[in-house]
Image (cartoon, helix red, strand yellow):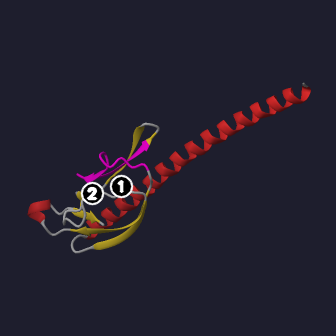
Amino acid sequence: MEYLVLTGFTMLVLLILLVAAYNRINSSEKEIDINSAERAVTRMKEAADFVYIHGHPTKLKISVYIPSDIDETRSFIANKTINLAVNVAGSHTDVWRSTRGEVGWDLYGSSTAFPSKEGYYVLTVESTDYESVYNGTINIYQ
């Protein structure tokens, strides 16, 4: 009888530890996704500001890591804002930065949407010279 009680108590403690470890790992993964999104958005903002300051025909290629669980319907690059929405526990967290100049995603039609799949992307950030059409927009595309 003592052996069964000791085994049951040990299993209960082990189960509690496993649940706590699972919750800790799950929250750490979400923190990593948010930190990755912050680094990506900050990198794009810095490149856009650099291109804005130096003007046309400045062009940069940058490498950014887009984390998993991106809400592509809420992520955008427009109107002096770069916004990346990360899904967290059924809702979303917006990671955004304001740029010095007007920014736009894919004004040249090189792809259809902001990258929404996890992975590394090489993005091109360049100044347009279409003053009348885009008001000197910084174009970011894949």
**Whole-number angstrom distance, CA of label 1 to CA of label 2:** 8 Å
Q: Secondary structure at mark 1?
A: loop
What residue is drawn where x is 21% and y is 72%? 56
Residue under circle 2? Answer: 113
SS category of the residue bearing label 2: loop
Residue numbers of the magenta segment: 69-87
- Image position of 53 with respect to 97: above or below: below
Q: Nearer the viewer, residue 95 or 136?
A: 95
* Left or right for 30, reference 75: right
Which residue, given by chain and number where applicable, does mark 1 sit on? 116
For the C terminus, the quadrant is bottom left
Residue 40 is inside the magenta segment: no
Relative to the observer, which residue lies in front, 13 or 45?
Answer: 13
In this view, 75 is above or below 112: above
Q: Camera-side residue: 64 or 50?
A: 64
- Residue in view at x 89 percent, y 30 percent: 3
Q: Position of residue 109 (x, y in %)?
A: 19, 65
Tell whether 68 sits left or right of 55. right
